[in-house]
Image (cartoon, rainbow, N blue to C red):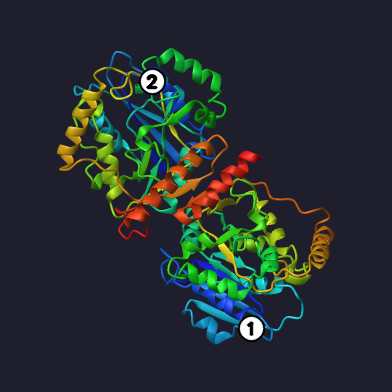
Amino acid sequence: MTTPKLSIVVVVHRMARQAENTLYSLSTAYQRHVAPDDYELIVVENASSDVLGEARATAAANRVRYFFRDERGVSPAPALNFGVRQARAPFIGLVVDGARLVTPRVVEYALLASRMDPKALVVVPGYHLGATEQQRDPTYEEAKEIELLARSGWQDDGYALFDIATLSSANASGVFHPFMESNCLFCARDSYDRIGGADERFDLPGGGSVNLYLYRRLALLAESRLVVLPGEGSFHQFHGGVTTTASPELPGVLAEHRAQLAALLGHPFESPKREPLLLGAVTSHALPALGHSVERGLSRFTRFRNQGNKAWSDDPDPTE
Amino acid sequence: MGPTLTIVVVVFSMPEQARRTLHTLSPAYQRGAPAGAYEVVVVENESPRLLGEAAALASGPHVRYFLRPERSESPVAAANFGAEQARGDVIGVMVDGARLLSPGVVELALLTHRAADHAVLSIPGYHLGSELQQRAVAGGYDEVAEAALLESIGWPLDGYRLFDVACLSGSCAAGFFAPFAESNCLCVPKAVHERLGGFDARFVLRGGGYSNLDFYARVCAEEDITLFVAPGEGTFHQFHGGVTTGGGDPASRETLMAALRDEYRAIRGKDFTLPAREPLFVGRIAPSARRFVVHSTKAWERQ
């Protein structure tokens, strides 16, 4: 078997059904214009009461390498780092929450971007399935989502996911605004190692804000070329996650996350302001989101221009 | 090591416009394009109003200049001659040397070439001015008005501001989510260019008729290419009294357009149709260019 060009690490914890969907969305049966030899999937599952298991993981997609870990902590960070250590490719994909379905050309574009620039940092915008973000709707639950997905026909046309989803608050204003994080992210293995991988000091349930910290550090590497895929998405499936389930405790949990993030950063979090290079086709399903991005982007740039500030102030040589 | 990209610029009786076009192809203006990664081949067909070698070479050592005696009214032979001179693996043909470029074209041509084996990069076309020049001329649009327009945006300080004083060409009027009829800066791998035999020399009418549209459609029909469109870049047509963009009496223009369509039909045995190939978008989109994305999404909604 040839060495893959891309290793995608998917971390799974108590989300067997959702992870099965995610892995199918990353398989060559679903992803377009890619071959089995192009990439491998590294599934790292932390022990739980709802285990996916090797048999189901390898049945859901081709070229899956499955690892089961008896993780004692409550964060996915060690699992992510473990997964990256297993990677055979120089370019890696990071799906820290295995409940994220992706659209059909994510892998193709990650590979294109890595050829374009080996230091590409490829960002897939995030969405939540459902009409609002899942944590904002106390009535949203798994059975509803199963029905929503079944009606959408997503297995046959993954772009139909856009029709039943809403932008995630990490990128609520779209592709001309800085992202807070990405739940489907690709980068050079070298870059990941250079920043020391996912910081395991983030030890809160779900990893707290480990993914925001990881994304910020990768995006601020001068060598990184930020590439955003406006026509693709990662779609969060409901799984009772720490920050994506409505609960009276959520504001307190988020405050704790913010405090830990600020403490480890040494300052309050800000999204990294690097100008993205856009890449990929935009289907009719994704056009409304792109229209929204342009509208929000225009007002942001007008504001920055009027203030005499640079909109992409984290670029080494910002042009605007 | 030689250049990766060769941009061929065909010039005929447009010295001032070509001088500005060449400035937009200089390393001083293009961003993120390493010196030595590209060259510009200027092919000038003889006319009483020459750009000339000295003016062409003044924009930098990356330029090579060829003057040709050309009897036909078509730029096709010059475009193919320029492509034969190319040292790069990718050939970008600008069949009308009156087109200014935005500053990211060269970088994207180099990036897309690396991204895919047979990458083709299509740059959308614009006209300077608030309406197509063949119409604007009736309201007094001319070279003087255009010079004032360029001055109003401080050109060439920020080339992306060209979007502030331009409108989409007829060939791209339906926006980025509909097929283009042509590109006035189309970067094609040399192997694909050679396989297709370049522009079809049978297009002999003024300005090359449909030769550029025909070449675009034939490139798009090649199965092994990956078509990229750069929605944040553009070619901007400067007024130069061109065959289809210079205005004049509407009846004569329509007669000419009919003759061009007939020539296409005679050569291809069918009417021209738009190449309906889905593009991958690539590049940054500067604030000035974003209104055209809005236009494109609205145009798509109306379909």
Q: Which mark is residue B285?
A: none
From mark 1 to mark 2, how far is it between C-alphas?
Answer: 67 Å
- Front residue of this view, candidates B95 and A93: B95
Label 2, on which residue?
Answer: A238
Which residue shows up at 54% across the image and 46% down it?
A: B294
Q: Which residue is mark 1?
A: B67
- Which residue occupies 36% across, 55% down? A306
Q: Residue A18: x percent and y percent? A: 40, 21
Q: Which chain does the numbered disc 1 sit on?
A: B
Q: Are discs 1 and 2 located on one and the same chain?
A: no
Quarter of the figure with the N terminus of chain B: bottom left
Give the residue type that dot 1 points to: Leu
Q: In the picture provided, is B274 more to the left or to the right than A272?
A: right
Of residues A61 and A134, the one nearer the viewer is: A134
Tell me if residue A139 can be seen: yes
What is the x, y in percent for residue B281?
A: 52, 49
At label 1, counting other C-alpha atoms closer than 10 Å, the crowd grade (few under 14, some 14-19, many 20 or more) is: some
Q: Tag 2's secondary structure? A: loop
**Number of numbered discs overlaid on the protein picture:** 2
Badge 2 sits on which subunit? Answer: A
The residue positioned 77% from the left and 77% from the top of the image is B72
In which image quadrant can residue A239 be found? top left
Mark 2 neighbour density, 10 Å: few (under 14) some (14–19) many (20 or more)? many
Q: Nearer the viewer, mark 1 or mark 2?
A: 2
Query: Image quadrant for the C terminus of chain B?
Result: top right
Relative image position of residue B208 (x, y in whole percent): 73, 68
Horizontal side of residue B48 vs B117, given as left or right: right
Q: Secondary structure at mark 1?
A: strand
Q: Can see residue A201? A: no
Q: Is residue B270 left or right of residue A183?
A: right
